Image (cartoon, rainbow, N blue to C red):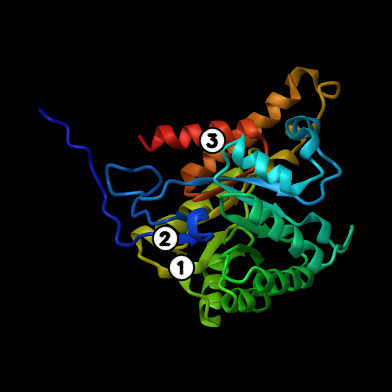
C-alpha cells in the first residue's frame, strides 16, 4: 500500500521583498509554506545569511578578533572579506560609533561609512543604528537622503520613532526593518502603522527581536512561528513580511560564548563553543521562519549556509 504524505495548503504567502538594486539585488520571502515544507508548496527564495560588520568594536571576543585579523578596525575591508571570503549573502552594518552613550559619531560621518561599504560590496546592505530613538531617526534621515535609490534596508524602526524612520525611507526609496519586543501583536501593529504612513508592504521586514540559545530562544521561536502561521494559514496581510533574526549579537554576548577556558575548563574550547552557540541558535530560528539571519563568525556563516543548501535539496 502506497504512503501518501499528508499536506496542508496555505491560504496566504509571505511577501517577496527585494533588498538592494541592480546586480546587488536579492529577494527574500515569497514562500507559501512553513520553513522547508517543500512537499506542500514553494520557497522561491531561500533564506539568506548576512554578516554583521561594525564601524566600531573595541570589545571583540578573542574568537571573533582572530577571525577578523587586521580588518577589525576597517568596516569596508571587513565587509569585503565577509562577502569575498566568507560567502555572506548580505552585509548587516551596525553603526556602533553613533551611540550617544559612547563615541556619538555624527549622522554625516556614519552616512559616509555606509556609502563606502555599499560601494565596496556586491550584495545588499542592511544598516542598523544602536536603538537610541532620536539618533536612529536622525541616521535614517541622513542616510536615506545620501543613498537615494540604493534600496538600503534601514532599521530599526520602532513604534516610538517609526514616522521619523519611515518617512525618509519612503521619500528616498529605501526598505525598512520594524523592530518590536518579541510579541506577535506588536509586530503586526508596527506594520500597520508603517503602511498607514505610506510604506509599501513590499518594502518592510520584521525584526521580532531574538534570544539566543539558553536566553529566550524558545519564546523567540514560538513568536516567529506564530507570525509565520498567521501570514500563511490565516492570510493575515500584516504578518506576511519576511523576518530578520539578529543572531550574532545575541549569541556572542552569552556567558557560554564569551567565557574563557580558564573560567570554565570543563566547557572546552571557547572558540568552538561560541561558534556552536551561534550556529545552533541560527538553525533553530531558520526553522522558526527567519528569512534573513545575521551572524558574526565566518564558520557559523559557512555551516548555516551549508544547512540551507542541504534543506533546499
Marks 1 and 2 sit apart, C-alpha to C-alpha, by: 7 Å
Crowding around mark 2 (Cα neighbors within 10 Å: few <14, some 14 to 19, many 20+) is many
Q: Disc 1 designates what residue?
A: 202
In the rendered image, is residue 216 in sight?
no
Q: Are marks 2 and 3 in contact (CB under 8 Å)?
A: no
Percent coordinates x, y for residue 233 in the rendering: 34, 59
Reply above or below: 199 against 185: below
Reply above or below: 103 against 91: below
- Give the image quarter of residue 260: top right
Residue at horizontal 80 percent and vertical 35 percent from the top:
70
Percent coordinates x, y for residue 57 in the rendering: 82, 46
- SS at circle 3: helix
Residue at horizontal 72 percent and vertical 72 percent from the top:
142
Percent coordinates x, y for residue 45 in the rendering: 40, 50
Farthest-out residue, left: 1
Q: Are marks 1 and 2 in contact (CB under 8 Å)?
A: yes
Amino acid at each position: 500500500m502506497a504512503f501518501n504524505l499528508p499536506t496542508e495548503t496555505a491560504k496566504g504567502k509571505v511577501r517577496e521583498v527585494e533588498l538592494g538594486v541592480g546586480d546587488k539585488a536579492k529577494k527574500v520571502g515569497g514562500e507559501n509554506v512553513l520553513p522547508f515544507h517543500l512537499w506542500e508548496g514553494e520557497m522561491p527564495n531561500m533564506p539568506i545569511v548576512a554578516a554583521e560588520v561594525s564601524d566600531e568594536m573595541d570589545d571583540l571576543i578573542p574568537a571573533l578578533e582572530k577571525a577578523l585579523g587586521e580588518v577589525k578596525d576597517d568596516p569596508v575591508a571587513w565587509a569585503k572579506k565577509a562577502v569575498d571570503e566568507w560567502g555572506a549573502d548580505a552585509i548587516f552594518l551596525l553603526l556602533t560609533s553613533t551611540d550617544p552613550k559612547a563615541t556619538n559619531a555624527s549622522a554625516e560621518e556614519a552616512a559616509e561609512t555606509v556609502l563606502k561599504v555599499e560601494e565596496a560590496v556586491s550584495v545588499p546592505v542592511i544598516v542598523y543604528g544602536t536603538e537610541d530613538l532620536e539618533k536612529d531617526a536622525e541616521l535614517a534621515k541622513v542616510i536615506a537622503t545620501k543613498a537615494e535609490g540604493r534600496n538600503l534596508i534601514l532599521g530599526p524602526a520602532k513604534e516610538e520613532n517609526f514616522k521619523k524612520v519611515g518617512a525618509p525611507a519612503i521619500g528616498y526609496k529605501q526598505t525598512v526593518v520594524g523592530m518590536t519586543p518579541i510579541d506577535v501583536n506588536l509586530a503586526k501593529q508596527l506594520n500597520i502603522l508603517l503602511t498607514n504612513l505610506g510604506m509599501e508592504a513590499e518594502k518592510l521586514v520584521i525584526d521580532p527581536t531574538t534570544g539566543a540559545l539558553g536566553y529566550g530562544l524558545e519564546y523567540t521561536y514560538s513568536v516567529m512561528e506564530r507570525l509565520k502561521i498567521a501570514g500563511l494559514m490565516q492570510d493575515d496581510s500584516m504578518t506576511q513580511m519576511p523576518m530578520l533574526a539578529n543572531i550574532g549579537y545575541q549569541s556572542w554576548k552569552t556567558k557560554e560564548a564569551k567565557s574563557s577556558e580558564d573560567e570554565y575548563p570543563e566547557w572546552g574550547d571557547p572558540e568552538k563553543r561560541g561558534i556552536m552557540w551561534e550556529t545552533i541558535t541560527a538553525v533553530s530560528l531558520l526553522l522558526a521562519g527567519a528569512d534573513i539571519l545575521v551572524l558574526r563568525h565566518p564558520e557559523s556563516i559557512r555551516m548555516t549556509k551549508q544547512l540551507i543548501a542541504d534543506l533546499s535539496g
